[in-house]
């Protein structure tokens, strides 16, 4: 479920292109959906009332996965721009 009160700011300027890619590619749609979920989870973990209960390794793994997804989304946006 998308949290419309907190858009994914990193890709906000490219939102129109993202919507087009989501319509035209099931793979991109899956990657972007996973990115949204991971970003939400990371935000929830980092703004939790009890962050000391969450292992650093777990938060670092979420950050790493989110970064990987961001890179892949960025590649799609660049590739689409070049074509």
Image (cartoon, helix red, strand yellow):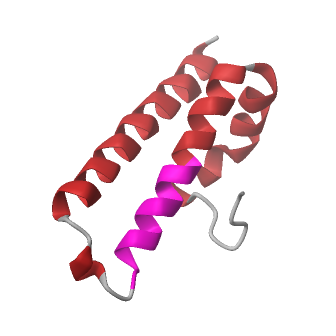
Please state the extent of the stretch shown in magenta in the rendering.
36-48
Q: Quadrant of residue 4?
A: bottom right
Q: How many marks?
A: 0
Q: Position of residue 32 (x, y in %)?
A: 60, 38
State which quadrant residue 46 falls in. Answer: bottom left
Position of residue 11 in the picture relative to residue 53 (left or right): right
Q: On screen, 7 above or below 77?
A: below
Q: Is 45 drawn above or below residue 79 in the view shown? A: below
Is 50 included in the stretch rendered in magenta? no
Query: Which residue is located at x 71 percent, y 35 percent?
Result: 17
x, y percent for residue 6: 62, 70
Asked if residue 14 is positioned above or below residue 78 in the image, the reply reads below
Residue at 18% from the left image edge and 56% from the top image edge: 57
Give the residue displayed 26% in from the left and 70% down from the top.
54
The image quarter containing residue 33 is top right
Residue 10 x, y percent position in the rendering: 51, 53
Q: Residue furthest top?
A: 83
Q: Is residue 38 magenta?
A: yes
In the depicted structure, whether residue 45 falls above or below residue 72: below
Which quadrant would the N terminus be assigned to in this image? bottom right
x then y, percent, for residue 77:
57, 28
Q: Quadrant of the C terminus?
A: top right
Residue at x 55% of width, y 24% of height = 76
Residue 67 or 52: which is nearer the viewer? 52
Q: Residue furthest front?
A: 53
Left/right of residue 21 with respect to residue 53 in the rendered view: right
Secondary structure character of the magenta stretch overall:
helix
Q: Is residue 57 left or right of residue 54?
A: left
């Amino acid at each position: 479920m998308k949290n419309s009160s907190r858009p994914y700011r990193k890709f906000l300027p490219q939102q129109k292109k993202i919507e087009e890619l989501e319509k035209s590619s099931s793979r991109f749609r899956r990657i972007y959906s996973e990115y949204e979920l991971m970003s939400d989870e990371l935000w929830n973990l980092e703004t939790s009332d009890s962050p000391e209960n969450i292992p650093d390794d777990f938060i670092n793994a979420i950050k790493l996965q989110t970064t990987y997804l961001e890179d892949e989304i960025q590649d799609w946006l660049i590739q689409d721009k070049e074509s």
